[in-house]
Amino acid sequence: MSLLRAEGLGKSYNSEIKVLKDIHFEIGSGEFVSIIGPSGAGKSTLLRCINRMVEFNEGKIIFNNQDIGKLNKKELRKVRTNIGMIFQHYNLVPRLTVIENVLHGRFGYKTTLQGVLGRYTEEEKERAFFLLEKLGIADHAYKRCDQLSGGQQQRVGICRALIQDPALILCDEPIASLDPNSSKVIMDHLKSITSEMGITCLVNLHQVEVAQNYSDRIIGLNKGEIVFNGTSKQLTQEQIQLIYGSEAKDLIMV
């Protein structure tokens, strides 16, 4: 069943530069899909168009049978509770504790006053600790986030997204700032989120081999256009060349 659909999606910042051009794709519930492509291909812009962190100029995004482009602010806020986001640089509040940062994922369900006062239910607090336990960082619950390693901070970011109870998680280069060991831990957790929890993951990656190892499907972007949409097995060296151009020679196929 389709959870997310893009129809003729386009994004321009001015009349000369089209960042995204006529993007069409469909993602089903429980799929793990990677978007790959060189720097400047439009990967981050595409992700941010889905939850309207960036406004698009053309086409449609249909999420859960709702036309994202037509939602007013209140409706969009409600839809965003169902779309988690994980960032390359974590986007945490460094001076706050791990548990406080995770609970921030519930802001979309709160009134402004409840959010400011940090009023969370016991059920929400228990859920936060459950998620921290699941990702192996419960021991750090009361540490400030700036005391953690990059890999640990990214796990906090994942917990913050999961506590929203989302149907979809958007991950913007989640391992770009991490060493290989931490990267594997993060990708393993993201994969288990899809396989065990049934949450759809759409992940921007620069590493072709990581995309091949973890994805049900891969979308290749080049200069704002989709030039590949298929399984890992369908991603040939020729397809990689098409996606990455001159950068392809530096990439290793597995």
Image: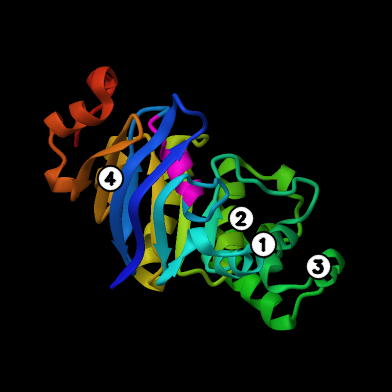
Residue underneath mark 3: 112
Q: Which mark is residue 156?
A: 2
10 Å crowding of disc 4: few (<14), some (14-19), many (20+): many
Of the numbered discs in the image, which one, if any, rests on residue 219? 4
Residue 147 in percent (x, y) is at 72, 44
Q: Earlier in the sequence, mark 1 or mark 4?
A: 1
The residue located at (29%, 20%) in the rendering is 247
Residues marked 3 and 2 touching at CB (< 8 Å): no
Residue 225 lies in the magenta-colored region: no
Question: In the picture provided, is 125 more to the left or to the right than 156?
Answer: right
Disc 3 vs disc 1: which is toward the camera? Answer: 3
Q: Nearer the viewer, residue 133 or 163?
A: 163
- Residue on which the image places disc 1: 102
- Is residue 135 visible in this depiction of the protein? no
Q: Residue at x 28, y 73 (%)?
A: 1
Q: CA distance from mark 4 to mark 2?
A: 27 Å
